[in-house]
Image: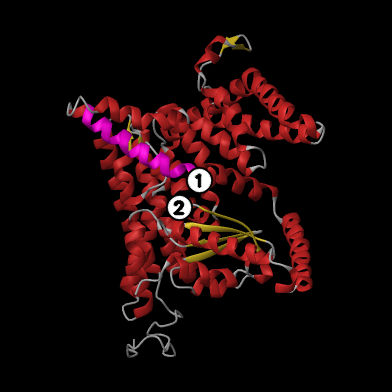
Amino acid sequence: MQRSSYDTAAALLPLVGGPGNVTSVAHCMTRLRLGIADREGVDAEAVRAVPGVLGVVADGDTLQVVIGPGAVVAVTAEFETLLGAAATARRAPDGLRSADGADLAARGAELKAARARRNATPLKTALRRVADVFVPLIPALIGCGVLAGLNGLLVNAGWLPWLTPALAAVASGFMALISVFVGYNTAKVFGGTPVLGGAVAAVVVYPGVAKVTAFGVPLAPGQGGVLGALAAALLAVGVERWCRGRVPDALDVLLTPTVTVLVAGLATLYGLMYTAGLVSSAIGTAASWLLATTGPFAGLVLGGLFLPLVMLGLHQALIPIHTTLIQQQGYTVLLPLLAMAGAGQVGAALAVYARLRHHTQLRTTIRSALPAGLLGVGEPLIYGVSLPLGRPFLTACTGGAAGGAFVGFFAVLGDRVGATAIGPSGWALFPLLTGNRGPALAAAIYAGGLLTGYAVGFLATYVGFSGAGVPGDPGDPGDPGDPSPRRSG
């Protein structure tokens, strides 16, 4: 019988140290992301063994539990419910609980959490928090991206002309106001009032900014894009905090929001929009130049290094760059290159499957994780197969590098491949593909890259990986979980 989301959440809670050890709960597309007060209170091996858990990534004071798309949403909801119930129980009268022990434990957790915060590197902390701003936007980016691609096909084919304007409005509405959502989430993540962050970021997309001149040049609505919205909301958080510490309580509700919006709004108009616009333009120019002049090399590096970024959870830091490119050019040319890493991973897993013909447990894991891998969800194969085995992880990166070089080669020839939204990869990226010469050619080049990644990942793994020392392989007769008889030679 399939394990319920409640069972998974209930099994995880004590293994991560209980409710008192969890400081925050969030999720991305595949991972339950927990803020942890005391890393010593987490039994990572036991968490990894919970049915439904595909892997564990511990990074500073954050524990990422890989569960998979769809399921992670339900497990996160159940986990938050359990935490809420525990908090209610802790607020019970003193006679119904052991107050002294709980207070001492809470104090100890606070001290250890402070130590963990001191040990966390500023770069990792900043990247995680920026990722937390953009990750909640991914479902809308995917949905609107698919609709934009479908609308483009209908327009090009001349079909359903009465429907295409409506589809264009539905697909474009979110992208037109994405800066507001970025501002709202930024203030929420960095400790400000979310609606004030959204209000200041809304200045970026307001049509009336065309009447404002900064540095001698009229502004354009949307100038600076999500980077401008991010900077505006961060400034708003800083101004709000400054006001909270200085404005009398009686006037706080009136003066703090007013000063925050005024100061941050004017700074956005007369500085941040212009500066962020330059940065955004530089990102687009750099990406185009990189592919046009060093396409194969750029693809090789990006495709080869993306799996380690996924393993560390740092791939989310690329979301602002993808989003900026989509706003500027209508698609991101980086995502198809990075998606080749998943192709190398699939090829490596197939080679392991072919090599370890008598390793029943590992082959079962590969069969279960392969469909997700083909659709671009790489964590099951990373944590269940290639990373524990060691060498297949490196050969998977080799396959990803080869696929990236293939796609990058065509970029040098002038055939750019892009994605109209971020989130999916693998086969799931096909509905989002487009390029400077149309979606059909883009899909053909992308398919060639996938096949290259599959082939090189498979061959590099199959040739160099013998399976010696892997528990359950015929070379290890002591594995109790493998009923296959040992064969010689």
Q: Could you tell me residue 409's position as x and y percent?
A: 36, 40
In terms of depth relative to the viewer, which is nearer, 88 or 465?
88
In terms of depth relative to the viewer, which is nearer, 199 or 326?
199
The kind of secondary structure element at disc 1 is helix
Q: Could you tell me residue 213's position as x and y percent?
A: 60, 10
In terms of depth relative to the viewer, which is nearer, 9 or 327?
9
Q: Is residue 60 above or below residue 409?
A: below
Q: Which residue is mark 1?
A: 135
Q: Is residue 72 magenta?
A: no
Residue at 47% over, 35% down: 323
Residue at 27% over, 31% down: 151
Quadrant showing the C terminus: bottom left
Question: On residue 29, which mark appears?
Answer: 2
Main SS, magenta residues: helix
Q: Amino acid at mark 1?
A: Val
Quadrant showing the N terminus: bottom left
Q: Amino acid at mark 2?
A: Met
Q: Which residues are magenta?
A: 137-155
In terms of depth relative to the viewer, which is nearer, 362 or 108?
108
Q: Seen in the image, is 354 located left or right of residue 93?
A: left
Q: Could you tell me residue 27's position as x and y percent?
A: 51, 54
Mark 1 touches mark 2? (CB < 8 Å) = yes
